[in-house]
Amino acid sequence: MTTSRLPAALAPWATALSAISPELAVALGPLLRRLDALVGEREPVADVHGDPDGLGGLSRSGRPDQLLPSEWLLADEYPEEFLRRLVDGELLHLAPEFNKPTVRGRMVALVDAGPTQAGAGRLVQLAALLVLHRRAAARGTELVVGVLGDAPGRTLTGDLAELLPAWLATRRTDEPTPSDVELALAELDAADQAWLLTSPRLAERIPPRPGVLTSEPARWSADGASHVTIRLDGTTAELPLPASRIAVRALRGAEFRRGGPVAVTPPADNAGKAGHPTLPVFNTEARTLLARGGQPTTLFSVNLPNHDRHAATALRMHRHDLPGPVLAAGRTGRRLIVLCVEGDQLITHVIGRQLPDPGGYSAQLAAFGVEPALLAEVLAGPVLPLLRRSADLELPLAGRWWRIRPDGRVADYGAVGPGTRGRTPFNRLREPRLFDGWLHDEARGVHHFLHSNDTQAWSHDSRTWEVRTAHGAPHEAPRGSAFRIAFSEQAEVIGLVGSGLITLSRAGHLVRNVTADGVRTLTRFSGGPGTPTVHPSRPLIAAETRPGRIVVGDPTTGRIHFLIGGTE
């Protein structure tokens, strides 16, 4: 969302509101501004920048005096190209770094997902999450969302584009109890700041505490609730709700900028609408890169050859048109196995050498217990991994691992790891189940976990990471090196390559390789519209730097090995 598409009062919110549609952002404006003022009285934002600390790499945004000299040279020689890059946000700037005081503790929102909060209550929660996420980012920490009544340790986090659809799917049929609140608060660290988003009825049944935000409908129109009464620590305000049409779309996820409803039946005419490859992903151990097309029924794939040491190689991806939206896929040997949604079934298709049981592995979608909103979110993200275990197919879906047997029977194979639970898209590098080595005792049950080959890393605060490189037989106590990596940047760790963490800044989309010895900014893989993908076992990273353009290279050196920009 650009600032020009927002009213002046919401212009400072442009980044935070980029996860929702402009129409919903404007409709939530009164709620956002009032809630932000109420929260600000109790949680003032400290100085965001701090003292200057040199330069931290390159960015695609900044002041004119931060433009690279080469960009000014381009303006002199090719002014039209300079203007095009300016409009498209492609000009490179020097990115300043700032010293920030260490912020301890997270900002935690404990939400009531029971029936009494349906409708108006959920709209207030949506506005509150936008406010809290923005303030958490300004403090240099993260927002963690917990659902009252869920098992301890089961929380939601990440950028708003990931967080909001996951929160929307957390509807519960039972009302939370005071004991649920007590249990959730007991799980927090001493430095965490908790905000409880609930109904007045539950708030009256718990001991008084700060940070309790309640809401209930105040006025009604022919289309439903038109105003809501909010209370925060004794302060009361009556505020308008979005109009019925936009409110319903918001509660269905249709106003989220990513993860909105996606049709699960193919269009009548899909020819010539496949579009460019997008959302690249390495989701198996093979040297195969998968990507979605312009339609959910299109899958792109390419097997990466050995790279030329002296120059980047141009590759073209193969396009596969399937009879239904692609849910999961994976290469096993000479087969590319694809799982598609066709009506109320999941149907398996094989590209290449066929399976021993042609036509098998077809299952009922209802057996997976996935809600339509969550399915739409998954289909809007990168293709899920599809693994072959013995004679079965295995995939993660709706927070669980599932096995599909050749006869179509579906078996629940347990919960996904804490680091992937409630997070979209699924990142196999965060899943302990897919780590073949010996899992360190301190890494068990940790939310922030990564693995690659024989190396594992974990963190309790997403900033300071313990890294262990093991040598020896799998599932035995490892013998190897141990070291610590710490960084202050507000960034998400997306991969682990060798002894380095691959991070993605949450503001400037800068990709970096952070090691115990220093930081390398991977400029050639930065600035894209989505999250780059890191190979689970090889030093490979792929990034969509602009629509229709994917680069693949080495995250340790920053060199590009392959350029992908077409199909065949």
Image (tube, rainbow, N blue to C red):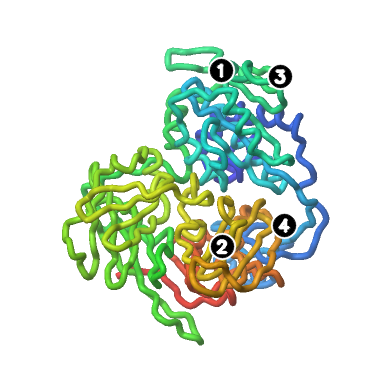
**Residues at marks 3 and 1, CA–CA distance in whole angstroms:** 14 Å
* Relative side of 104 to 480, left or right: right
Disc 4 designates what residue?
488
Disc 1 to disc 2, how far (Cα)? 48 Å
Q: Residues within 10 Å of mark 2 (few under 14, many from 20)?
A: some
Q: Amino acid at mark 3?
A: Thr
Image side of residue 57 versus residue 265, left or right: right
Tell me the element at label 4: loop
Which image quarter holds the N terminus?
A: top right
Q: Farthest residue toward the bottom?
A: 310
- Nearer mark to the viewer, of 4 and 2: 4
Residue that label 3 marks:
235
Question: Viewer-proximal residue, 36 or 12?
Answer: 36
Residue 83 on image: x %, y %: 58, 61
Q: Mark number for residue 85?
A: 2
Q: Are marks 1 and 2 in contact (CB under 8 Å)?
A: no
Amino acid type at image mark 2: Arg
Q: CA distance from mark 4 to mark 3?
A: 36 Å
At a point 61% along the width and 58% down the height, the residue shown is 458
Q: Nearer the viewer, mark 2 or mark 3?
A: 3
Q: Residue at x 48, y 43 (%)?
A: 257
Q: Is residue 481 above or below residue 255?
A: below
Q: Which mark is residue 216?
A: 1
Q: Position of residue 406 (x, y in %)?
A: 22, 56
Q: Is residue 488 at all visible to an observer of this figure? A: yes
Q: Secondary structure at mark 2?
A: helix
Task: Say whether disc 3 or disc 1 marks the residue closer to the N-terminus.
Answer: 1
Q: What whole-number distance in Å separates the C-alpha atoms at marks 2 and 3?
A: 48 Å
| Three-letter amino acid code at the position of disc 1 | Glu
Q: Nearer the viewer, mark 1 or mark 2?
A: 1
Disc marking residue 82: none
Q: Amino acid at mark 4?
A: Ser
